[in-house]
Amino acid sequence: MYRSHTCGELNASHIGNEVTLSGWVQKVRNKGFMIWVDLRDRYGLTQLIFDEERSSKELMEQAGSLAREFVIQVKGEVIERVSKNPNIPTGEIEVLVKEFEILNSSKTPPFTIEDETDGGEDLRMKYRYLDIRRNPVKNKLMFRHQVGMKVRNYLSNEGFIEVETPYLIKSTPEGARDFVVPSRMNEGQFYALPQSPQTFKQLLMVGGMDKYFQIVKCFRDEDLRADRQPEFTQIDCEMAFVDQEDILNIFEGLTRHLLKEIKGVEVAEFPRMTYADAMKKYGNDKPDIRFGMEFAELDEHAKNKGFNVFDQQELVVGIAVPGAASFTRKEIDKLIAWVKRPQVGATGLVWAKYNEDGSLKSSVDKFYAEEDLKIWADATGAKPGDLILVMAGEADKTRTQLSALRMHLGNELGLRKADEFAPLWVVDFPLLEWDEDTQRYHAMHHPFTSPKKEDFALLETEPGKVRANAYDLVLNGNEIGGGSIRIHDKETQSQMFKYLGFTPEEAKEQFGFLMDAFQYGAPPHGGIAFGFDRLVAILGGQESIRDFIAFPKNNSGRDVMIDAPAKLDEEQLNELHLRLKL
Amino acid sequence: MYRSHTCGELNASHIGNEVTLSGWVQKVRNKGFMIWVDLRDRYGLTQLIFDEERSSKELMEQAGSLAREFVIQVKGEVIERVSKNPNIPTGEIEVLVKEFEILNSSKTPPFTIEDETDGGEDLRMKYRYLDIRRNPVKNKLMFRHQVGMKVRNYLSNEGFIEVETPYLIKSTPEGARDFVVPSRMNEGQFYALPQSPQTFKQLLMVGGMDKYFQIVKCFRDEDLRADRQPEFTQIDCEMAFVDQEDILNIFEGLTRHLLKEIKGVEVAEFPRMTYADAMKKYGNDKPDIRFGMEFAELDEHAKNKGFNVFDQQELVVGIAVPGAASFTRKEIDKLIAWVKRPQVGATGLVWAKYNEDGSLKSSVDKFYAEEDLKIWADATGAKPGDLILVMAGEADKTRTQLSALRMHLGNELGLRKADEFAPLWVVDFPLLEWDEDTQRYHAMHHPFTSPKKEDFALLETEPGKVRANAYDLVLNGNEIGGGSIRIHDKETQSQMFKYLGFTPEEAKEQFGFLMDAFQYGAPPHGGIAFGFDRLVAILGGQESIRDFIAFPKNNSGRDVMIDAPAKLDEEQLNELHLRLKL
């Protein structure tokens, strides 16, 4: 038996007990006549003490040889500490060591194993096993586990059945790029790794499973943007005999449960916003509504006043930045420079200060009288003390730019509080979006999403205007879930594939199995998928999902620790060539 | 809202209520003046009634058009049934339909959607979504979910943390064949799909996670024997600061918990048996100990008695078959034919009947007197009424053949009872096994398994005799889990790779990251992995694991429903060639 207690367990009630502990040497303080060692494991830290008077000379010498990250086992007596540490649960005691054994030595770690470390990210990734010893990382992995357990237990209690769907499936050209897996038993053929279990969960609904969920790895062979992993985890759900309202209610319930259980936060009924409104008010389909700064369209108040920069633009739109009338010229110039960066790409920014004394002053005073600016203030909801910022240009682009500025200011002004949670349903997404490259419509969500009945007629005439029974759950400016009510009859699904540019043969080849299934009594059904990585990160109060993944890949899709992917050895490569019939 | 209640919910307490139900038409009985419809969903079956007197003519006509597997929604009143069905929870009531809507029609299903179906396995696999509607299949999937939840909650409550390990890892030549995945971002390089998260869970132990588990998909690109899947699910566990005893106790606890919670069976402390004993007593490292028939070695009692068929053999070994003295000559001949089949490969079988009257009679009476046979009876533990069966030949081969016969008789005599559970720990497995093909030793478990300290010296002299700190959990003749205490220091691990025929360069190339990790304070650790598919099947009282998998693959590794694997389209294939630099 390596231990009688963990390093986080002992307190004053154990004084006088003989105990056995095992763990890592966090720190050694050697005063010659006394040696203190902080012993660490997953559960905490316990102070060990060796001293001249009570410990043998041999033991003192052995203790003197200890260094950071050595793994040791000690036996000793729990005694009261002279200088107590009220900051840790074991701070009232220490263990007077009577015997100890070095279970393993350690080279000096390449960075300090402490909450604040001196290791850069690359180094910490290379030695991820050492990084995981640090509380901030260890706690994030444990937090992820807790969220997973709570999700599973909630859904299971609600009658959802976790069903494992296959990882070795068929490649589909739609969507992102598939990772493919050559098959040895079926030469020249390939499996694909799933981008989501979408068609399988629909088949489970056809199969009468009624309520399905799965926490499951999915794969996308795409260029990796920052903080996006080629393998990611999804909470995948589907229900039969439901309409959109049922789905929103159930998963609002799940989200509320998590917020309450994990964050201790009670949230009111989640507001709902149409996609069109979200774009108009926030320039963004996943608005962070923890703070205001809603967009106000100023065209009628700003055009044709002699400021011809605005006159020719499709859209003039502004926001009121609370309390920012006090910004200095320098601060405003910095904002202007910020929006002009290529990442944002705006041409500039017009500002108007609504001073505390009620006066208004702008960068375009030459063209706008104070009463004009007052109208801007009313439109943007600015109050004395606020700063109005205005952008103009092509409508979609300008909204996106102003949205970026709004989020930037939200961060700068501390309005995006980590301990505040503002969920939002965005509904009525467009069914289709035009793709310039391929010169055809693509499914905005996926080809299985049902159009709204009342918009069905528009499919032939104005496909871009057709709304879908599709919804996203947004939390603090992040899309954490998205789903739709699906098509459940063969005719509509065939028609949809036609609109998306599939020939009947292609549709049959790719999705024939699903359309066949629809002929045998498919129930109405719909579902949602949560990005588990993102959900965990947001609940954990962080933006980076990578921190919550034990062995993440870097932006080149490499696991730097195990150095994967790698070349195959000759034998493997030869066999692969055989399989591919090359 | 598609339903106010499910089809399994209504009973006498609901009589008089207006309800809405949705589901599938299981059966229609049309008597002209009355029509009964059994409506089915995941939760049960509810009888609907339409009748001339209480239903409109239009409704009667609509109801008349219904056929099997149509999906309908009905509104009506819960009424008392005239002829009650005590066999189902809803048997006291029926629903008098007032309105209904056909939500989807159905073609006639290719097999009947009933507990006993007329569909053969291939057909049911092709239409798996219809098969899943059948109770036996649906219940197995729900059972699998329940087992998964209980495993997770038990381990989580015991302090285990579920950590997701990567699916896109590095290929290793050791073990079974890897599925490989070409990388697009790293040309000419490949990921491999994990055969198990072995090295990652060891790194988590080095990382101080202390107790890890994961229910996780693993992959083996091997020729598929019956009931073996290329992707399979594992309960993967690892613990730090433990010895073998700790691991056996914890996972005996898990198994006992599952048996109690799921089967209502209380099991005594699991017996333990060394690998050597298991082979000697049962000819098998996963003996089914629900029944006896232990092997008795009869060499000294059977050789040199003039029966020269035995004299030259390495081993003469027998079993006593309880109550089988009454077997007819024909029945015995059938057994002899059974062992002579190429699948078993024995040359024959000697028998001796221990008659109820105490007399003994054998097929070799010419050579053995009754007192000789009495000695055989004593050695095999035969009692009056039993049949003694004896085999002889090369020791290992003969044990395997007799083991097959023993299992066959266990099945034939009904000794392998589905509701009886006999777990067993098999311990002290050999560390290495000799491989004739490669003319070198291979790790019996895997290269990370630690040898027993007391056998360490044998590594140089008699490697085949070295025992490992390795153990299997056997349940009813099936290996459901296996694991070991691992090597946790770089020196031993390097030495092990050397014994296994790795050059230092190969060892570094393949497992350098693990050996590096061992230099930074690796704790003693060990673990176990359960075959989840097998565990679920055995707890479910079945031998076939395929039944408990929603979308299994056939013996050629094909998912017949979605027809995967498949050829890539031209664009995908071109890109793949680019990636592989072909």
Image: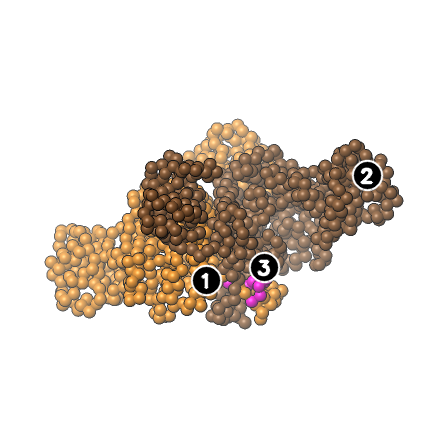
Chain colours: A brown, B orange
Amino acid type of disc 1? Gly
- Residue at figure coordinates x 39%, y 35% from the top left: A12
Disc number at residue B178?
Answer: none
Q: Which residue does the numbered mark 2 point to in the structure image? A: A361
Estimate how packed mark 1 is, as few (under 14), some (14 to 19) or many (20 or more) residues with alpha carbons within 10 Å.
some
Q: Which residues are magenta?
A: B179-188
Amino acid type of disc 2? Lys
| Disc nearer the start of the sequence (2/3) | 2
Tally the numbered discs.
3
In the picture provided, is B243 more to the left or to the right than B303? right
Estimate how packed mark 2 is, as few (under 14), some (14 to 19) or many (20 or more) residues with alpha carbons within 10 Å.
some
- Badge 2 marks a residue whose secondary structure is strand
Q: Chain of mark 1?
A: B
Res. B380 image quadrant: bottom left
Between B237 and B51, the one lying in front of the other is B237
Position above or below: B478 against B579:
above
- Badge 1 marks a residue whose secondary structure is helix
- What quarter of the picture does the C terminus of chain A occupy? bottom right
Res. A304 image quadrant: top right
- Residue at figure coordinates x 78%, y 42% from the top left: A351
Task: Give the CA separation, mark 3 to mark 1.
Answer: 21 Å
Residue A523 percent location from the top left of the image = 57, 44
- Badge 3 marks a residue whose secondary structure is loop
CB-based contact (under 8 Å), mark 3 and mark 1:
no
Q: Main secondary structure of the magenta part?
A: loop
Q: Which residue does the numbered mark 3 point to in the structure image? A: A556
Amino acid type of disc 3? Ser
- Residue at figure coordinates x 31%, y 50% from the top left: B424
Q: Chain of mark 2?
A: A
Disc number at residue B512?
Answer: 1
Q: Are marks 2 and 3 on the same chain?
A: yes
